[in-house]
Image (cartoon, helix red, strand yellow):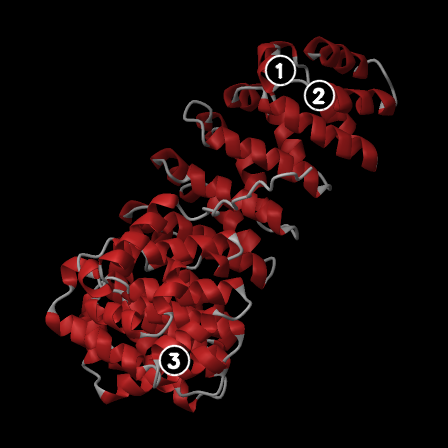
Amino acid sequence: MAAQALTLLRELARLEAPLEELRALHSVLQSVPLSELREQAAELHLGPLFSLLNENHREKTTLCVSILERLLQAMEPIHVARNLRVDLQRGLTHPNDSVKILTLSQVGRIVENSDAVTEILNNAELLKQVVYCIGGENLSVAKAAIKSLSRISLTQAGLEALFESNLLDDLKSVMKTNDIVRYRVYELIVEISSVSPESLNYCTTSGLVTQLLRELTGEDVLVRATCIEMVTSLAYTHHGRQYLAQEGVIDQISNIIVGADSDPFSSFYLPGFVKFFGNLAIMDSPQQTCERYPVFVEKVFEMMESQDPTMIGVAVDTVGILGSNVEGKQVLQKTGTRFERLLKRIGYQAKNASTELKIRCLDAVSSLLYLPPEQQTDDLLRMTESWFSSLSPDPLELFRGISSQPFPELHCAALKVFTAIANQPWAQKLMFNSPGFVEYVMDRSVEHDKASKDAKYELVKALANSKTIAEIFGNPNYLRLRTYLSEGPYYVKPVSTTAVEGAE
């Protein structure tokens, strides 16, 4: 088969309009194993195929791209980099996006190969074309270009090639295309900055990080909303947070939240700004963040009382993030009756909101109520029990009701709430004393899809592995839980058939 493919490939060079041969080659290659093609890689002469890409014939281009995709996979990245550099450069400026994507996928292979990447770094023209691909209309082309440049910047030589040459001017030139392209360049800069303090230093020296931060705190509310997402990505790293604090950016974001009350357009950017602080709190210290930026906590409570589902959703997510560790739970507990009211509001939304917001409420409740066994002090157990009862007059029944609705996502999210509290003695007592609840847990017929079966299994596992379960549920129920656990999530009870004498 590989020999037949090679013969067809050679014939292409001798024919003027080889459409039939292209179709035949395409068909043959579908059944040739990649290992066979690799053995013949030295004999694969791809020049004729690359030439055919220039003929502006739709079917030929589609066939050539598909064939080249297969054949190039058989070649070592260093061979592609050394022997096809001119073809790669042409591919990046080709009017057809599928050709650009093919070429960028090869550039991606090359930059991930430590031997081949040098070939790219020494090819300034090719790098320039990759940069200009960020400015194309096709998002897939732009994403592939960003990915390759981000990968190149993982080495010192790559950082120098990007930031200490004319490429930086090309990057700044591409940014002027339009707003969307400018944000794509920011996305690349944030990705590079996040790698290490040294990478961040190259990016700040380029002036592009400063430009991003200027736009974040500027007057355009839509630009703010886009920029805060990128700045939040930068804040995921310790060196990124340090830089933002040193530059006074975190204080500026806090001040903008303070001024949001008098801004009629604050709903555009406020959700992103609040999310920023939620992430900041959980990555550093919830207590320090909330003490230093009290306006953040204040705004979360305000948003929870809003009538706007977008604002409520962000408040719910943020509370869930904040309460995902013990320090954050204690910060929320200190707000006293205000937090009890907030929990009641979450319980109300979990019952009455849209399906999407219900799921977000249930996820936040799971996060707030979960306590690892080693952190289950009497005080913290009393706290989670009191939080649970603040959600609704009968929270266990509320979540059972939600779990019986015919939406797998809701069903799983409600089971997650039960799983979060399943290892806490007060919750086990509630479950045991709730009529029919133990049977509901053991009943496999309730779950019909894989995700629901997995979620139920996690609940059973959390109960069965708890040290207090045998005492609270009793030994017979404990043994049933262990049996369920050992049978696995997808067990189906065999149906017994009784033979009747005289039956056919």
Task: Tell which of 50 and 335 is nearer to you.
Answer: 335
Task: Tell which of 402 and 348 is nearer to you.
Answer: 402
Task: Tell which of 239 and 174 is nearer to you.
Answer: 239
Q: Which mark is residue 29?
A: 2
Q: Which mark is residue 346?
A: 3
Is the Cβ of the residue at disc 1 closer than 8 Å to that at disc 3? no
SS label for mark 2: helix
Compare marks 2 and 1 and give the one earlier in the sequence. 2
Residue 434: where, in percent of width, then height? 32, 74
Say left or right for 443 vs 495: left
**Residue type at tag 3:** Ile
Residue at 57% x, 19% y is 75
**Residue type at tag 1:** Leu
Task: Using the rendered image of the protein, determine whether residue 123 is visible from the camera's viewpoint.
Answer: no
SS label for mark 1: helix
Q: Is residue 39 above or below residue 316?
A: above
Residue at 63% x, 26% y is 86
Say left or right for 84 vs 375: right
Q: Is residue 376 above or below residue 479?
A: below
SS label for mark 3: helix
* Residue identified by numbered label 1: 37
Is the Cβ of the residue at disc 3 closer than 8 Å to that at disc 2? no
Residue 20's image quarter? top right
Residue at 20% x, 67% y is 425
Pick the quarter of the image with the C terminus.
Answer: top right
Is the Cβ of the residue at disc 2 closer than 8 Å to that at disc 1? yes
What is the C-alpha distance between the residues marked 1 and 3? Answer: 59 Å
